[in-house]
Amino acid sequence: MTSCRSILATAILLLAACHQQPNGAPANGAADDSQPYDGITASETLHFVGTEPFWGGQVTGSALTYTTPEDQAGQAVQVERFAGRGGVSFTGMLGGEEFVMMATPLACSDGMSDRSYPFTITLEIGKDTRAGCGWTQRQPFEGADQP
């Protein structure tokens, strides 16, 4: 059964696509504008981090690990992956609450380091919304390895 948040995540990604090509460039009416975003493939690992509160993790395909300073080993979250026109979303359940994470190809700063990341991450756990940044091996962050 599709949840309201999953529908919301899909709608956000489709709306973002109105302003971007699959490679993140502004839309210009090109015929390939209807193709799903392919900047993060299902076989790639997307790493993500956020602050206030600190959180992070990684996702490959349908296997996501969500970490916090209190739980550095992390919690496994089985997710469904959806590639929209403006990014990728992952939906599942964490601790009995709906987990929805969206990655969009927009430059991002974590506000705590001099790093620049290629993806902006929006995370919803239940009613809590968080903002963070993401990267892959193919599209790494720029800046110091250890902030």
Image (cartoon, rainbow, N blue to C red):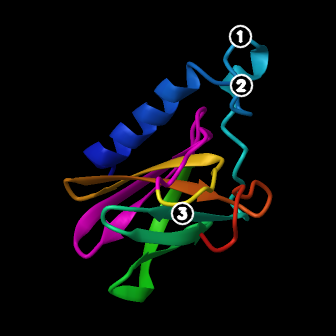
* For residue 8, above or below residue 34: below
Mark 3 in CB contact with mark 1 (< 8 angstroms) = no
* For residue 58, above or below residue 107: below
125 left or right, relative to 147: left
Mark 2 in CB contact with mark 3 (< 8 angstroms) = no
Picture quarter containing residue 107?
top right
Mark 2 in CB contact with mark 1 (< 8 angstroms) = yes
Give the labeled residue for mark 1. 28
Numbered circle sitting on residue 38: none
- Magenta part of the protein: which range? 83-111
Q: Position of residue 31 (x, y in %)?
A: 77, 15
- Choose between 119 and 23: the one closer to the eye: 119
Residue type, numbered disc 2: Ala
| Inter-mark Cα distance, 3 to 1 | 30 Å
Picture quarter containing residue 48?
bottom right
Give the labeled residue for mark 3. 48
Picture quarter containing residue 47?
bottom right
52 left or right, relative to 146: left
Farthest residue toward the left?
127
| Quadrant housing the C terminus | bottom right
Badge 2 density bin: few <14, some 14–19, many ≥20, Cα 10 Å: few
Task: Give yes or no for residue 97 being in the magenta stretch.
Answer: yes
- Choose between 128 and 3: the one closer to the eye: 128
Q: Is residue 88 visible?
A: no
Q: Position of residue 95 (x, y in %)?
A: 25, 76
135 left or right, relative to 62: right
* SS of the residue under disc 2: loop
Badge 3 density bin: few <14, some 14–19, many ≥20, Cα 10 Å: many
Numbered circle sitting on residue 25: 2
Badge 1 density bin: few <14, some 14–19, many ≥20, Cα 10 Å: few
53 left or right, relative to 41: left
Q: Position of residue 71 (x, y in %)?
A: 37, 87
